[in-house]
Image: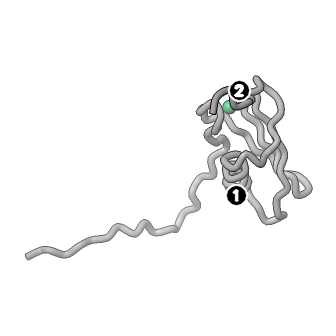
Amino acid sequence: MGGRKRRKLVPVRQKPKLPKTFECPRCGKVSIAIKIKDGIGKVNCGSCGLSTEIEVPPVFGQVDVYGRFIDLYTEGKVEISGGEKIEDEGESE
Ligand SMILES: [Zn+2]
């Protein structure tokens, strides 16, 4: 009895707060700030100095830009500038 599964579907009534900072994939700190202008998302880490720019559709918000950035970063397709350079020259393989 009472085996009713209650699934909690959170009602999306109020708008979730958009985080203003995001976790940096390089230093792990939540200090990524994202600005969007003219279809360019500017990603900047206030902690390690990572910064890059990626092209994004005009409809993209900060979260979307961050997602895209993470994808590109993971794939090594994003050009990172600023901060310490972490270059894997493949010492041993
Ligand atoms: Zn960082």
Q: Secondary structure at mark 1?
A: helix
| Quarter the C terminus occupies | top right
Query: Which marked residue is nearer to the observer: mark 2 or mark 1?
Result: 2
Quarter of the image holding residue 14?
bottom right
Quarter of the image holding residue 34?
top right
Residue 12 drawn at (x, y percent): 51, 68
45 to the left or right of 16: right
The CA distance from mark 2 to mark 1 is: 22 Å
Q: Amino acid at mark 2?
A: Cys
Q: Residues within 10 Å of mark 2 (few under 14, many from 20)?
A: some
Q: Dot 1 corresponds to which residue?
A: 64
Q: Amino acid at mark 1?
A: Asp
Which comes before the other along the chain, label 2 or label 1?
A: 2
Name the residue at 83% across, 33% down: 81
Asked if disc 2 is less than 8 Å from ligand 1, the answer is: yes
Which disc is residue 48 wearing? 2
Describe the colour scheme in one phrase: one colour
Q: Secondary structure at mark 2?
A: loop
